[in-house]
Image (spheres, rainbow, N blue to C red):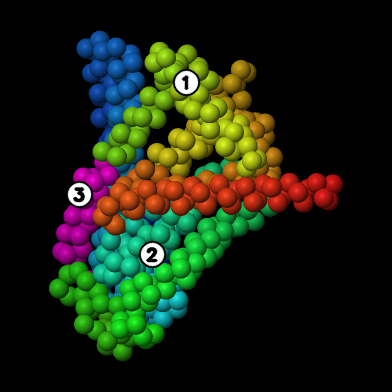
Amino acid sequence: MHLVVFVCAAAFSVWLTFGSLGPLLSRIMEAGADWWILLLDHTLQRIGAPPMLQNLVIRGICTGIGSVLAFVPVIAVLFFCLSCLESSGALAALSRALDRPLQRLGLSGACAMPLLLGFGCAVPAIMAAERLPACGQRRRTVFLIPFLSCNAKLPLYTLLAAVFFGKYRLLPITTLYLTGILLGVILLRLRMRMLPMQHAHACIPNGRNTSRPYRMQGCSCSMANAKLPHDIRLRLPCFSAACAQAWENSKAYIQKIFTVVLLASSAIWFLEHFTPVLTPAAVPQESLLAVIGRTLAPLFAPLGFGDWRAAAALLTGLSAKEAIVSTLAVLAEAQTPPQTVDELLMQTFTPLSAFSFAVFSLLYMPCIATLAAVKKTLGGLRWALATLLTQTGLAWLAAFLIWQTGSALQLFWG
């Protein structure tokens, strides 16, 4: 009964965070940010600021600020819901129910909620993992979250599936979601086999394979000392503590991640608007971004997409995965004559290379905001660098195997 209550409460929380209140507040925040940006744009024009400075402030700095502010309402709603679930006892019910099966991955039931949130957005999911009491579980949960397909990757999946797979578009999208989950689980199992004693002592008290309850932390009315599941009593959540939790985490998000995303967005703007000799780029093909794309393109040729525009889109995807689609659209518009993004994709990819590209986009290094969240949650730059290298190396290998194996099969079957 308790598990059913939690499933309903969790589903409502996810809907409230990613499908209703969170997106509504984000749109309000974006509308307010757009109003301030428009006002700033008019002010710069009235004082006669140079056009390049206007472009930097509006499209570089303000765009970076807007991308951060759009996450804040979602994070606030997320942690409000998490605190409500915790203080009501519902989160303890799920933690106890899933504790035993998740121990096989070196996790516990307490890790279930951050993992589920990873399908919405990796940043709040990793921040939710920060609440886990055990350091080992926190690290393994953060390790798994980037393998999950967040909402930011779905536009790319949908676009490629619609262009290359038509009425069978649901099959590659589902395959991509399952691929990320399976690879994450397999790699975590391999990691546990390589470091068995570390994982045993980190997850199981006294080295014995016994189930243990998850002790909730947070406000004073949480089920911290309950003997799960028999002693769980559902109650009304502590709304005051939930509001305080939402405020603290929102403030921490702005303080720790704001500057990282801002610098990354400004860097992408610079690459898009200047040539290698630091003169303004007349067309995108002359920009530093295009030069870097052509330099990186040979690395992706064995994966089936050696076009510089694909490499440039992956580079801008480091700021946000949605930028992959927007970059491809901008590059398509800049062609002579202008193309639609569908025409550019048909010119650049085949169905096999498009799937290889999607797998690489699924697995390669997370966005800058996610890396900053990893650094904050695990408390060190080395963890963010390890995530960057592991994800990118695995992405290259997986896309290589898909393209080479698929090409061999196509050659064999004619």
Which numbered disc flags the more N-terminal residue, 1 or 3?
Answer: 3
Q: Main secondary structure of the magenta part?
A: helix
Q: CA distance from mark 2 to mark 1?
A: 40 Å
Q: CA distance from mark 1 to mark 3?
A: 36 Å
Which residue is at the far right?
A: 414
Q: CA distance from mark 3 to mark 2?
A: 25 Å
Q: Residues within 10 Å of mark 2 (few under 14, many from 20)?
A: some
- Quadrant in the picture for the N terminus: bottom left
- Residue at (30, 49) in percent of width and height: 381
Q: Name the side, left or right, on which 136 lies relative to 194.
A: left
Give 80 or 259, whichever is nearer the viewer: 259
Which numbered disc flags the more N-terminal residue, 2 or 1?
Answer: 2
Residue type at numbered disc 3? Lys
Task: From the top left corner, tell me how far across and down residue 264 is, in percent.
Answer: 35, 35
Provide the residue designation for mark 2. 140
Q: Name the side, left or right, on which 250 lies relative to 371.
A: left
Secondary structure, mark 1, is: loop
Residue 118 visible at all: yes
Foreground label between 2 and 1: 2
Secondary structure, mark 3, is: helix
Q: Residues within 10 Å of mark 1 (few under 14, many from 20)?
A: many
Provide the residue designation for mark 1. 287
Give 401 or 333, whichever is nearer the viewer: 401
Residue 1 visible at all: no
For the record, the magenta segment spans 236-258
Residue type at numbered disc 1? Ser
Provide the residue designation for mark 3. 251
Please tell me how many numbered marks the rendered image carries.
3
In the image, residue 361 sits, relative to residue 207, either above or below, namely: above
Which residue is at the far bottom?
A: 230
- Residue at (57, 58) in percent of width and height: 179
